[in-house]
Image (cartoon, grey):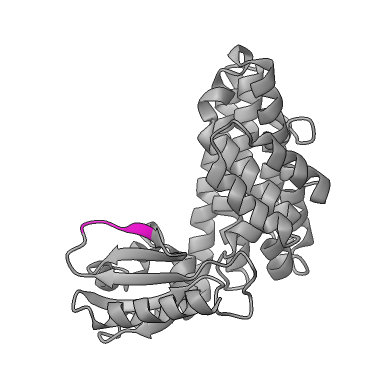
């Protein structure tokens, strides 16, 4: 850790001295009370001359870079809501902010009125409903295995990208610690919204240490080296369900074409993807969409 801490400090000093850098912050769990063995030192900078955002990983330090212009445009909530990494901004620890704009963005997000949070939540729920309705329509056009699998994938994606942020908006909190979901979901919202949290459990069929081990073994030969490495870090630290969550979602993202042509796959490839997606344990097709719909209603009703 000492070597990385030294490199991190040097990089911070170099970025602060760089005239192109107009704001710098530390993000993520590294260096906080939430740090764990899988935490990656992460910096967020806003720089002149960048045309788009990008990230780079060097010497174990992740550097997230944003165009300088975003420092101004994201001071408008509607713009930030539409395009900004809200959780990253809300939880960033400011290291350098001569214009004060990064601090203003955080103040804006921390001071959102109840009415604005309600509108933000409703927009997330409306988007979730649109996606679930579209998935039902697609499922209605075909009831084969590919359609069943894609319905499950959509239900999970809606839960994480729309329903989880909407749930946390009741607490004026922002989704963090993606590698440790669903542990963060349970810790932040489990006591207040037990039905909603249980909905995620039903969709993913986590299964603890045994299921995590099965999923890790199933990644072999599927081109998931990086994903397996991150999931193994979670597994070794006891975040078994976090490892399963990551591998289920990443397998669906990377191998969607395989899901769409399921019957044409070799038996060995189907077996591996079946384990990763959790086909034998998880709800498929209309059942998955029904659970996601119930989860949406639980989020809306603060359950």
Q: Is residue 118 above or below residue 221?
A: below
287 left or right of 163 in image? right
Q: Position of residue 177 (x, y in %)?
A: 59, 64
Q: Is residue 55 magenta?
A: yes
Residue 183 picture quarter: bottom right
Q: Residue at x 59, y 37 (%)?
A: 251
Is residue 45 among what the camera can see? yes
Extent of the magenta region? 51-56
Image quarter in which the C terminus is found: bottom right
Could you tell me residue 199's position as x and y percent?
74, 50
Q: How many marks?
A: 0
The magenta stretch spans residue 294: no
Q: Nearer the viewer, residue 222 or 44?
A: 222
Measured from the top left, where is residue 30 in percent x and y? 55, 74
Which residue appears farthest toward the front when viewing the image?
3
- Which quadrant is the N terminus positioned in? bottom right
Residue at 38% across, 65% down: 63
Q: Position of residue 65 (x, y in %)?
A: 32, 64
Front residue of 55 and 279: 55
Judge whether residue 181 can be spotted in this image.
no
Q: Nearer the viewer, residue 221 or 181?
A: 221
Residue located farthest toward the top when viewing the structure as drawn: 264
């Amino acid at each position: 850790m000492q070597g990385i801490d030294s490199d991190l400090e040097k990089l911070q000093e170099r970025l602060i001295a760089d005239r192109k850098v107009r704001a710098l912050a530390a993000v993520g769990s590294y260096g906080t009370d939430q740090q764990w063995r899988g935490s990656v030192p992460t910096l967020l900078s806003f720089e002149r001359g960048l045309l788009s955002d990008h990230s780079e990983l060097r010497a174990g330090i992740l550097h997230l870079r944003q165009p300088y212009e975003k420092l101004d445009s994201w001071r408008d909530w509607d713009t930030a809501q539409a395009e900004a990494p809200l959780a990253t901004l809300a939880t960033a620890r400011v290291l350098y902010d001569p214009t004060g704009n990064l601090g203003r963005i955080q103040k804006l997000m921390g001071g959102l009125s109840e009415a604005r949070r309600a509108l933000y939540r409703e927009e997330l729920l409306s988007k979730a409903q649109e996606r679930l309705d579209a998935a039902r329509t697609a499922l209605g056009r075909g009831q084969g295995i590919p359609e069943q699998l894609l319905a499950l994938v959509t239900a999970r994606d809606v839960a994480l990208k729309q329903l989880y942020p909407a749930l946390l908006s009741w607490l004026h909190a922002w989704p963090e610690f993606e590698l440790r979901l669903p542990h963060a979901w349970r810790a932040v919202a489990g006591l207040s919204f037990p039905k909603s949290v249980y909905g995620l459990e039903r969709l993913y069929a986590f299964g603890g240490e045994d299921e995590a081990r099965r999923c890790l073994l199933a990644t072999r030969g599927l081109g998931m080296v990086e994903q397996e490495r991150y999931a193994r870090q979670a597994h070794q630290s006891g975040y078994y369900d976090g490892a399963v969550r990551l591998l289920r979602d990443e397998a669906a993202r990377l191998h969607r074409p395989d899901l769409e042509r399921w019957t044409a796959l070799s038996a060995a490839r189907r077996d591996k993807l079946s384990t990763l997606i959790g086909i034998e344990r998880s709800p498929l097709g209309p059942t998955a969409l029904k659970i996601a719909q119930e989860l949406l209603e639980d989020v809306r009703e603060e359950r």
